[in-house]
């Protein structure tokens, strides 16, 4: 009986320590025309919110803390960032037809890359973009600055690409810098921001 009481006492002592470490934490940054925050909940989920002068975004997902300094984020439910269908048409030009995931037309910038390391940029595009040349990969940036993943072209003769892009930000094994009192987030371009989300 004494052993059981001792074990029960140890469990009670350890419970507050776990609760304190796993408590919900809100980190935020705000300026006159921009607001961004993330709420890390104690069940391993998060609520992300971003608002600009013209847009706003709310995303839920799951988080993990690795090595006490890397915050790993995954959206839930997870979404596909980019869908591409390759085909060949009797035409010397390469055509990129771009829609969002709902098949609606969007404005976008497209960056075409070659094996030699050269790039060709088409800005303020709508519906289709045509180009001449041999390209190895490409990526798309929407009007909010959201970058798609780089897509590596599979077909040797492919010259028509039917593309769907996700317009909402998707967290997929995304790594943010975690420093207890603040977090350095990744921007829409995949690079670390020059501002911090401060713990409240």
Image (spheres, grey):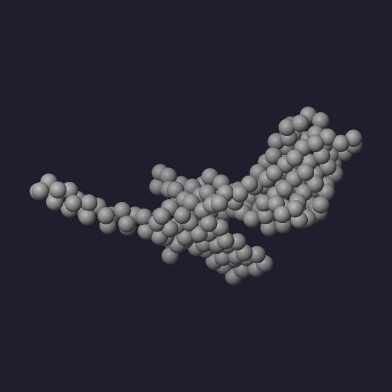
- Residue 110 seen in this snapshot: yes
Outermost residue on the top side: it is: 156
Q: Is residue 21 left or right of residue 79?
A: left
Location of the C terminus by quadrant is bottom left
| Residue 49 x %, y % | 55, 62
Outermost residue on the right side: it is: 91
Q: Is residue 161 left or right of residue 200?
A: right
Q: Quadrant of residue 34?
A: bottom right
Outermost residue on the front side: it is: 1
Total of numbered circles in the picture? Answer: 0
Between 177 and 149, the one lying in front of the other is 149
Outermost residue on the left side: it is: 2
Between 16 and 188, the one lying in front of the other is 16
Q: Is residue 27 above or below residue 77?
A: below
Q: Residue at 47% x, 50% y: name it.
A: 63
| Residue 100 x %, y % | 72, 53
Q: Residue at 70% x, 49% y: name it.
A: 165
Q: Is residue 170 left or right of residue 176?
A: right
Q: Residue at 84% x, 39% y: name it.
A: 94
| Residue 50 x %, y % | 58, 62
Q: Residue at 64% x, 55% y: name it.
A: 168
Q: Is residue 185 left or right of residue 128?
A: left
- Residue 197 seen in this snapshot: no
| Residue 13 x %, y % | 21, 54
């Amino acid at each position: 009986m004494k052993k059981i009481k001792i074990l029960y006492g140890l469990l009670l002592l350890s419970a507050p320590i776990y609760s304190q470490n796993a408590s919900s934490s809100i980190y935020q940054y705000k300026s006159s025309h921009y607001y961004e925050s993330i709420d890390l909940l104690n069940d391993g989920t998060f609520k992300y919110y971003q608002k600009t002068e013209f847009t706003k975004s709310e995303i839920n997902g799951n988080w993990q803390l690795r090595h006490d300094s890397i915050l790993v984020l995954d959206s839930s439910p997870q979404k596909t960032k980019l869908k591409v269908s390759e085909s060949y048409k009797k035409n010397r030009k390469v055509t990129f037809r771009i829609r969002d995931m709902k098949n609606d037309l969007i404005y976008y910038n497209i960056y075409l890359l070659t094996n030699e390391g050269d790039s060709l940029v088409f800005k303020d595009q709508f519906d289709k973009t045509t180009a001449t040349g041999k390209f190895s990969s490409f990526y798309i940036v929407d009007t909010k600055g959201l970058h798609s993943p780089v897509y590596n072209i599979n077909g040797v003769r492919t010259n028509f690409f039917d593309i769907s892009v996700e317009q909402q930000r998707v967290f997929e094994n995304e790594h943010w810098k975690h420093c207890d009192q603040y977090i350095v987030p990744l921007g829409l371009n995949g690079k670390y921001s020059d501002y911090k989300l401060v713990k409240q």
